[in-house]
Image (spheres, grey):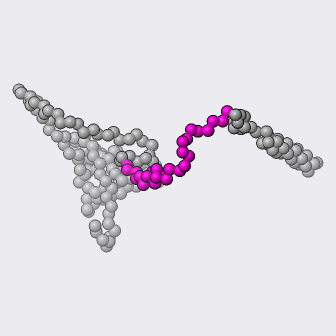
Amino acid sequence: MKQQRLVIVLVVLLVVAGLVWFRYLKSDSNVLTADASTNDQDYKPLSIENPRLRLEEIANTRKTEYKSGGRNIFVAQAAAPVVVAQQQQKPKPLPVGPQQPVDPPPPPPPVLPVKFYGYGTIPNGTVRLAFFTDGEEVHVVREGELLLNRFRIIKIGNATLEFEEVSTGRHGTAPLEEQAAPGGPTP
């Protein structure tokens, strides 16, 4: 009984496949293109005076060399704005009278007194740990904790560390410094 059903299903599928195949072959013979429907009487050749090859123009084209304008043609970005040379302008006259005090330059970013030489993660969590050394002692600090009671670790990245000096609120970054292997060459 089960084999009879399988044979019937197979025959039905073969009949459907045969109908689809026959219809596909028959429809290809009746396909008309746009060129087949035009009249030959309406044909007008292009008005070219001399249809010979222009070998000198081809040779000149082959000799041309691409000169970049500084933009990568393979990247879909807007071109960098072109700086137009300005004509010399008259210097502005110096103001006469009291002058405004000049603001002092901003203080330099803070610098860590220790060396950031690595990072790690806790296997069960997403908290990152940063490893610091001052030559003798190793400090292990999590994101958000204080280092040497002066610096708050904000973010531990793969190559850099972001921190904040607690007393002034200034932010800074420290690069990951490679440590030479013991007994290896020093750069």
Residue in view at x 41 percent, y 48 percent: 72
Residue 3 in picture, x, y percent from top left = 91, 51
Residue in view at x 23 percent, y 46 percent: 109
Q: Main secondary structure of the magenta part?
A: loop
Name the outermost residue toward the bottom.
183
Q: Is residue 129 magenta?
A: no
Residue 173 in picture, x, y percent from top left = 29, 48
Q: Give the camera-side residue of 133 and 21.
A: 21
Residue 100 in picture, x, y percent from top left = 11, 30
Residue in view at x 79 percent, y 39 percent: 30
Q: Is residue 46 magenta?
A: yes
Residue in view at x 43 percent, y 47 percent: 73
The stretch in magenta equals 42-68
Name the outermost residue toward the front.
49
Name the outermost residue toward the top.
97
Q: Is residue 13 visible?
A: no
